[in-house]
Amino acid sequence: MPSFQKRASIAILLLVLLMAVVFYNKSAQPNKPSSSVSKKSNKDHNKPPNKIKSNENEEVVAQVQHPGLVQLDDAKKKALQDLENRIQEDMKKEPERRRPPKIIAGLRKEEKIDEDIVGDGDTQLVQGVGNNDFDDGAAEHLVEKNEYEEEDKPRHIPAPDFRFLSSVDQTEQQKFIVKMFQHAWKGYKESAWGHDHAHPISKTHDDWFGIGLTLIDAIDTMYIMGLEEEYADVRDFVATKMNFNVNVDVNLFECTIRVLGSMLSMYQISGDAIYLEKAKDIGNRLLPALSMSVSAVPYSDVNLKTGNARPPRWGPDSTVSEVTTIQLEFRELSFITKDPKYKDAVDRVSDHVASLSGKKDGLVPMWINANTGLFRPGGTLTVGARADSYYEYLLKQWVQTSQTEQKYLHRYLEAVGGIKSHLVGHSMPSGFTYVGELLGGITPSAKMDHLVCFLPGTLALGSKLLSESHPKESREHLELARDLMATCFEMYQNTPTGLSPEITYFNLAERAKEDLYIKPLDRHNLLRPETVESLFYLWRITKDPKYREWGWDIAQAFEKHTKVASGGYTSVKNVMDPNNPNPFDKMESFFLGETLKYLFLLFSDDDSHISLDEWVFNTEAHPFPIRSSAAVS
């Protein structure tokens, strides 16, 4: 062969090799996220997103991912290419395949979001989520693998289309409550954006968990109210900035009902997969509080970064409400993910508490120890602080699965019987019905927390559902609900500000002139939701207009005495002084997440807007769909 032909052959060979190298390197680069990527692109082998240290620059991501990709053999590279080809095909079909937009007010049973399908093609995203989540040895898994050692880079999950409530569908009272919410949101956004609580007077904030509690608690309220602009900002924060990988100990109960509850609720009412991602993330970070405990009783606190769990720092015992008001949320997480480990963990707690001695006719002591698994002997029996939502969740676990788990109904009926036998009393001289306490399980006390005012709503809901199977109990429960509702409203009307104190005492002496009295240290009001929550239930179930009138009076009292002119609302220290209620300068997250939501729903003329036949509220007012059964399959 002539030399020039040899040289030409060598040149061609080198050119081919060079092109092969270029093509190889190019194919090894990860695909950059695109704003048009469909949701199906997030289901690659059910793997969590790659994690890097808080640098979201795409080139840095490529540098981190590249060394691993160049190790791929031809078969794996072909599989990735096939996946990308399917993604591109799905992108072309997406406009035709997308489910129609949903709105809570318009949902009927036949239109409910299918828990198996987030949108066509997303079944694997839901059904396979348990494969990489925590197992029963959650704490060891966390510490060994350092799975959350570095900050998660948020995956790109595009928001689906939404249809919001139109203002023309709202009553005048609802429009007023929406303006209250917008004013509260203004105070939060200007002084506490991304932080837990706003201090609207001083324009500062505080961080309890450091993850944006108010923002998280309020998101479904603004969605339900139809506040599209406010919602878009929050959804963007959740998708791109919200980070649960923080080295902080959180209270299992509070984080479950507010954060996990909100993410689960938003996933169900919007169908947006970003909330499922966040729900799985926070659920797995909370799970070690149950799996690390030496008994069936979970620890009260868990570190979101390390997974280390422990009892409360201030003492050896947890409150009974802390360990028995996490069930709806973890059960819902199992229903969505098809992974039974979450439901199994909390059902174990419920059954254990039910098996313990030390109860009195269904009433439980307020303290329980995670190390021994036992109640503290001589604990007070109360439906107020430290035990309240235990009784609420007895009924709602039965409701959650379409009344299929009869054990919860039996426990609920027994507990209401115990309340009627041991805690219900009547004041002098007017005979207001109250629910007091048994101090040490023995001594009656005519003390009633504002927290007890959840009970009329729970009783009314139970009465509605028991009307056919237990007609006698249904009538008795509704009568007690009405009587207690009147007392809870009187706790507001009895003060010069029209705001209820945190705690009220009832006179029992025959010569008493006033039925209610308030101790100086109990005169504060924290913008709590319990009374308006029960007004919502009583209105929905009885249609008695006085419950709306009472709710309107309470809303006006909040507006007059707690509103901060520049934005926000504040807790107050003294409901007995209308001229100087002495503000705390703090707006709790539940004011936006619960109080204003229940007021908004109270004034709705459309009972299908969060229908009680289709939805059950957790104790933080986040609605979950009612399931057909307790099975996870």
Image (cartoon, grey):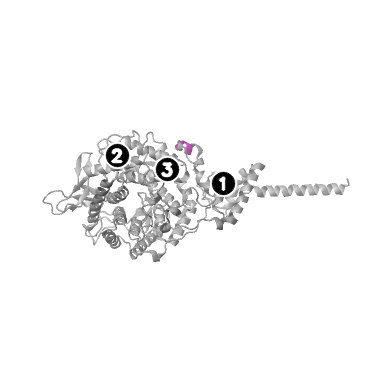
Q: Is residue 141 left or right of residue 444?
A: right
**Label 2, residues with CA under 10 Å away: few <14, some 14-19, many ≥20:** many
Q: What kind of residue is marked 3? A: Leu
Residue 228 x %, y %: 44, 61
Compare marks 1 and 2 and give the one earlier in the sequence.
1
Callout 2 touching callout 3 (CB < 8 Å) = no
Alpha carbon distance from label 3 to label 1 = 25 Å
Residue furthest left in the image: 511
Mark sitting earlier along the chain (2/3)? 3
Residue labelled with disc 1: 44
Q: Which residue is mark 3?
A: 286
Which callout, 3 or 1, points at the residue further toward the start of the chain? 1
Q: In the rendered image, which residue does mark 2 sit on?
A: 367
Whole-percent x, y for residue 498 in the image: 24, 59
Describe the element under mark 1 as helix, strand or loop.
Answer: helix
Which element is circle 3 on? helix
Please provide the residue range marked out in magenta: 139-143
- In magenta segment, residue 141: yes
